Image: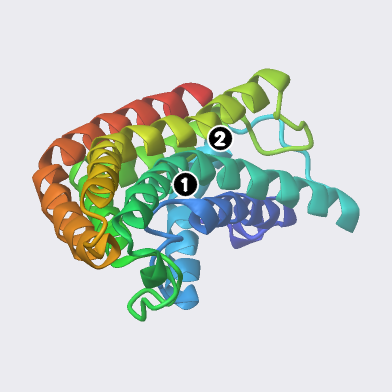
């Protein structure tokens, strides 16, 4: 028989709120959960369901939690829990930001920069090609079970960063998050270089052609050539990029597991 007075005690309710808040922080920045238009009600109920599953495990393993006796103390605990979940999702989302940055780079080189303002599908400013690579990365993310790794990371974080007053953001943790953030540029560069390099060489060759044949309107010729060439290269490099993105996903998941 369950003792409802103990189950719904103030300490258990606050502990459940802390778990729910940490998961909410993960949902705020995690890939797929934050980048796609999932209804807020669905996110809230999903976070509550996960918190309900984790509650007895966290309660059994938590021995140092002290129930706060004031609103400021409770606010401090919930803010800390939200920041931990936010940091885990943020580190995972760095990969998608780097991919988007790299694809945007060679998309602009193709001459499709205006598409960033005229794309009605996403409601944002990302080009259609960028969305295609984002969908590709999302499918790989799910196929590799990366979403399960994220929930495993949030579960393990309750062991390394237990619920309570102690703020666990050590200088080493901040340094590791900064290192992960800095990899946006290396990922973006690795994604952009193959296609961007070929398009850059194409621009150089078109420049030589313009000097040798001044009567040719090189601008009217170069624009469709670069678009067609960019689309063909995007299709040609999609499979090797998918393999590279899969490697990046595994590396990021390993780093997140080591950090948290």
Q: Residue at x 39, y 48 (%)?
A: 105
Q: Is residue 215 above or below residue 22?
A: below
Provide residue 98's location: percent of width, then percent of height: 42, 42
Can residue 69 be spotted in the picture?
no
**Is residue 166 rendered to the left or right of residue 1?**
right
When asked about the image quadrant of residue 164, the answer is top right
Q: Residue at x 29, y 66 (%)?
A: 128
Q: How many labels, in total? A: 2
Q: Is residue 79 above or below residue 169?
A: below
Provide residue 149's location: percent of width, then percent of height: 34, 38
Q: In this orientation, which residue lies closer to the viewer: 130 or 223?
A: 223
Q: In this orientation, which residue lies closer to the viewer: 74 or 10?
A: 74
Q: Residue at x 37, y 44 (%)?
A: 102
Q: Which residue does the numbered mark 1 point to in the structure image?
A: 54
Q: Which residue does the numbered mark 2 point to in the structure image?
A: 158
**Is residue 36 rendered to the left or right of residue 245?**
right
Query: What colouring style does the render use?
Result: rainbow
When asked about the image quadrant of residue 241, the answer is top left
Q: Is residue 176 above or below residue 148?
A: above
Q: Nearer the viewer, mark 1 or mark 2?
A: 2
Q: Residue at x 77, y 31 (%)?
A: 166
Q: In this orientation, which residue lies closer to the viewer: 59 or 89?
A: 89
- The Cα–Cα distance between marks 1 and 2, rounded to whole angstroms, is 10 Å
Mark linked to residue 205: none
Can residue 98 be spotted in the picture?
yes
The answer to the question of whether label 1 and label 2 lie on touching residues, with beta carbons closer than 8 A, is: yes
Q: Residue furthest bottom?
A: 120
- Between disc 1 and disc 2, whose residue precedes? 1
**Is residue 237 rendered to the left or right of residue 128?**
left
Q: In this orientation, which residue lies closer to the viewer: 126 or 70?
A: 126
Provide residue 247's location: percent of width, then percent of height: 25, 29
């Amino acid at each position: 028989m369950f003792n409802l007075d103990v189950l719904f005690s103030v300490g258990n309710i606050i502990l459940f709120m802390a778990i729910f808040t940490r998961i909410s922080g993960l949902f705020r920045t995690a890939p797929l959960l934050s980048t796609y238009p999932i209804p807020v009600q669905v996110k809230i109920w999903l976070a509550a369901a996960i918190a309900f599953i984790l509650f007895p495990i966290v309660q059994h393993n938590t021995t140092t939690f002290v129930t706060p006796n004031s609103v400021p103390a409770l606010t401090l605990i919930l803010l800390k829990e939200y920041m931990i979940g936010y940091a885990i999702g943020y580190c995972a989302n760095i990969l998608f930001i780097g991919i988007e940055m790299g694809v945007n780079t060679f998309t602009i080189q193709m001459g499709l920069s205006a598409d960033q303002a005229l794309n009605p599908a996403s409601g944002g400013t990302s080009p259609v090609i960028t969305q295609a690579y984002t969908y590709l990365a999302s499918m790989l993310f799910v196929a590799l079970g990366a979403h399960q790794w994220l929930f495993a990371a949030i579960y393990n974080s309750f062991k390394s960063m237990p619920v309570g007053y102690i703020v666990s953001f050590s200088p080493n943790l901040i340094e590791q998050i900064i290192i992960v953030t800095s990899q946006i540029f290396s990922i973006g560069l690795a994604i952009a270089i193959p296609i961007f390099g070929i398009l850059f060489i194409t621009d150089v060759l078109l420049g030589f052609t313009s000097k040798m044949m001044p009567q040719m309107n090189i601008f009217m010729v170069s624009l469709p050539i670069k678009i067609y060439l960019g689309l063909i290269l995007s299709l040609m490099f999609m499979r090797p990029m998918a393999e590279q993105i899969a490697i990046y996903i595994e590396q990021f998941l390993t780093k997140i597991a080591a950090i948290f």
